[in-house]
Amino acid sequence: MVRFHLSTTATATASPLHSHGVELVAPFPLLSLTPHHRHRHHFQLPFPSLSASTSSPRCSRRKRASCSCKMTDSQGKATQPAGRDVRSGDMIFQPILEKGVFRFDCSADDRAAAFPSVSFVNAKDRETPITNAAEAVPTFIPTYQSGSESQTVQLQLPAGTSFYGSGEVSGQLERTGKRVFTWNTDAWGYGPGTTSLYQSHPWVLAVLPNGEAIGVLADTTKRCEIDLSTESVIKFVAPSFYPIISFGPFPSPAAVLSSLSHAIGTVFMPPKWSLGYHQCRWSYDSDLRVREVAKTFREKGIPCDVIWMDIDYMDGFRCFTFDKACMLRII
């Protein structure tokens, strides 16, 4: 998708947020292009994947008993035999970052094996305990079940807890009773039941019955199931090994998000023109049509700062290209 940013002079590339349509009556501006194409980040086969310890693609009947196979279910999740190298119990913890923030791991070895954080602005903050908070104990401690392939974490909260967050997903803002999969994809035509969209955020905001709130982050970039279908329980399932970061309980959801921002950073201040009206559809077939739309907005005095185009502007749907036959006057 490409954004055509409308400016009101022949040299400007950014226009102000208009409160009315008068300023839009001007010659068609220069266009600044920001290419953006939707990518499918993960691909799944419709059948389970199979890996065998033998070098042959098939196991003979004689050797079949010695073949070691790894299967995945229809959702792409790794499955493993029950009771095989499975550990469980309460997670170990240490205070990090600031008061009320804790890191949880299944064991000290798992803590050492976890990948560096890409969630924290400063990855070292996740790895560094707070020395002056050695006596701090979290209000809620997750339990885990972990094997060589998968790690399941559950956090039991008071009855009546409601859940929010879980990233960019469809449906209502309250996520209580839902299951979400952090498996971002090009989800065009999605509906209320779609469990994966364009971004993945393994994060849950829980509002407790007393009005306090706690935030829980599964700090992993791998496919993660967020299961909120059990009463007052947060459940994460993802490949081993990953830590859990909790923020709170704090007096309010706003306090939780403030603490979270100290870990992952804050949203940058958007440019003024980005707050204006954006005209978007799928799609415009030529540069003449784009110019016609822009001209009509100005003639009718309707403020418009941006016109978006979908992938039809491309040459053969190849990123960073333009179809010169129909988009020549925009290049």
Image: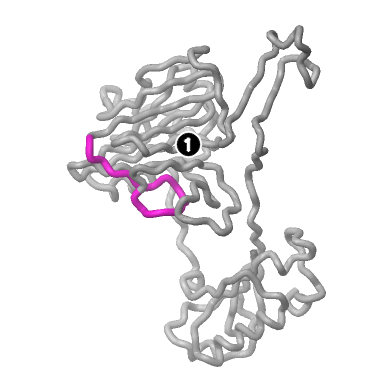
The reply to whether residue 136 is visible in this rendering is yes
x 58%, y 84%: residue: 8
Q: Where on the picture, by quarter, is residue 6?
A: bottom right
Q: How many marks?
A: 1
The figure's colour scheme reads: one colour
Magenta region, main secondary structure: loop
Position of residue 243 relative to residue 119, above or below, is above
| Residue that protrudes farthest toward the left in the picture | 210
Left or right, residue 229 beside residue 285: left
The reply to whether residue 99 is visible in this rendering is no
Q: Where on the picture, by quarter, is residue 172?
A: bottom left
Left or right, residue 96 beside residue 304: left
325 within the magenta span? no
Position of residue 228 relative to residue 287, above or below, is above
Range of residues picked out in magenta: 159-174
Left or right, residue 79 beside residue 145: right
Quarter of the figure that contains the C terminus: bottom right
x 76%, y 11%: residue: 61
Tell me if mark 1 has few (under 14), some (14-19) or many (20+) residues whose alpha carbon lies within 10 angstroms of its own.
many
Give the x, y percent position of residue 270. Answer: 48, 64
Task: Name the residue type under label 1.
Answer: Glu
Give the x, y percent position of residue 111. Answer: 47, 22
Left or right, residue 95 beside residue 18: left
Q: Which residue is mark 1?
A: 225
Give the x, y percent position of residue 184. Answer: 56, 46
x 79%, y 17%: residue: 55
Give the x, y percent position of residue 4. Answer: 63, 73
Under circle 1, the secondary element is strand
Quarter of the figure that contains the N terminus: bottom right
Position of residue 279 relative to residue 165, above or below, is below
